[in-house]
Amino acid sequence: MNEEIQSQNTTDDEISLIDLFAVLLHYKLLIIITTVAAMIFAVTISVISLKLPAEKSFLPNEYTPKALLLINDTTGGGVSSSMSSLASLAGINLSSSGGGISYSSLATYLAGTDSFLDSIVDEFNLINKWKIEKHVRTESRKVLKKKLVASFDEDSGVFSISFTDIDPNFACEVVEYAVSYMEKRFRELGVDKNEIKKENLEKNITSTYSEIERLRSQIMNLETEAQGYSGFNIPSITMETTRIEMEITAQTEVYKQMKTQYELLKVEMQSETPILQVLEHASVPDQKSGPSRGTLCIIITFAAAFISVFLAFLLNALKNIRNDPEAMAKLRSGK
């Protein structure tokens, strides 16, 4: 008995498959024409979009330059409190497992701040470029976030910044500006303390050297004046000269100490890994990052094939209903 039922089910399955195949054969022209038409349409719009200028094309080529930055998260916890307060205002936890600040989290956070986005928008006049008329700040940030991508790879410690646009040169300029902004903000927040010390020492050394030169000029002027004065004025000039020479000696000693500190700091900085280091600057891409017109053509062609097959079965079902008196009676009674 079970064998008979199983045999009957197998027969029904075979009949069903044959019926399905028969439907496909019956509507083969519909399926073929629809699929071929969709394929021709996809290829045509792809070619047209490629021939049109990028500004007028509905599917222009896009280019995505990328810059790579190495972020050293191994530095100790002695970091400026301004960074912690900056992140805490936004509810961001920048603490690393070692108790210090996670500079990678800080960089990721900075890349999403309004000040960062607005700086790029203003620098390149993106509001006018993108023709934004309403809610200009909010909308410009939204558009920029879609095009600008900042991400951090925890395995390699590399922070990447990329920007997508139809103009490869413009996209490269945006990425380079974003990198320079990051470097500037890290310096302003006091992340790289040695760099700040170096800048301060350079300023102080230059200032001290200028002061020494000024004092030496004063001595030369006094010596010139002494030649035209009588003997009664010589002692006062001598005292003033002695005072200036003592000040020069003191300034020279300060200058020597600062130069020594400066040279030692340079040696120390050479032995340390910078917190934020540019591994690779953005370069103008010569190959598009999208869209993939070949993939688009394949998707449209397969979609058209599936739709045409579904339409064939739908038409066949409607035909069977029309030829079935019982089914038509049910439909009429339903009215």
Image: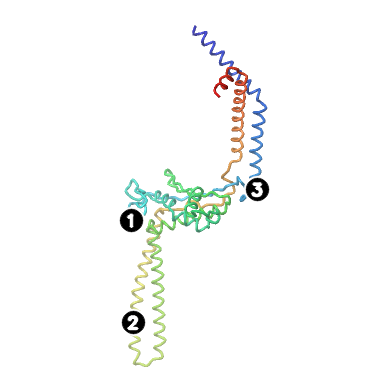
Locate residue 240 relative to residue 30 in the image: left or right.
left
Name the outermost residue toward the top: 1
Badge 3 amino acid: Leu
If you read the primary sequence from the N terminus, does the residue marked by circle 1 or circle 3 appear first?
Answer: 3
Residue 305 on image: x %, y %: 61, 30
Decide if residue 3 is on the left or right side of residue 233: right
Residue shown at 36% from the left, 69% from the top: 256
Q: Which residue is mark 3?
A: 52
What residue do we see at 59% from left, 49% from top? 286
Q: Which residue is mark 2?
A: 242
The answer to whether marks 1 and 3 mark residues whose Cβ atoms lie closer than 8 Å is no
Dot 1: few (<14), some (14–19), or many (≥20) neighbours within 10 Å?
few
Mark 3 Cα within 10 Å, few/some/many (few <14, many 20+)?
Answer: few
> What amino acid type should be assigned to the residue bearing mark 2?
Thr
Q: Amino acid at mark 1?
A: Ser
Q: Which residue is mark 1?
A: 81
Position in image of residue 218 (x %, y %): 40, 81
Percent across and percent down for residue 145 are 48, 49
Closest to the camera, between mark 1 and mark 3, is 3
Q: Residue at x 58, y 43 (%)?
A: 291
Q: State the SS at label 3.
A: loop
Rendered location of residue 6, percent (x, y):
52, 11
330 is higher (above) or lower (below) than 157: above
- In depth, the one of 59 and 110 nearer the eye is 59
Q: Which mark is residue 278?
A: none
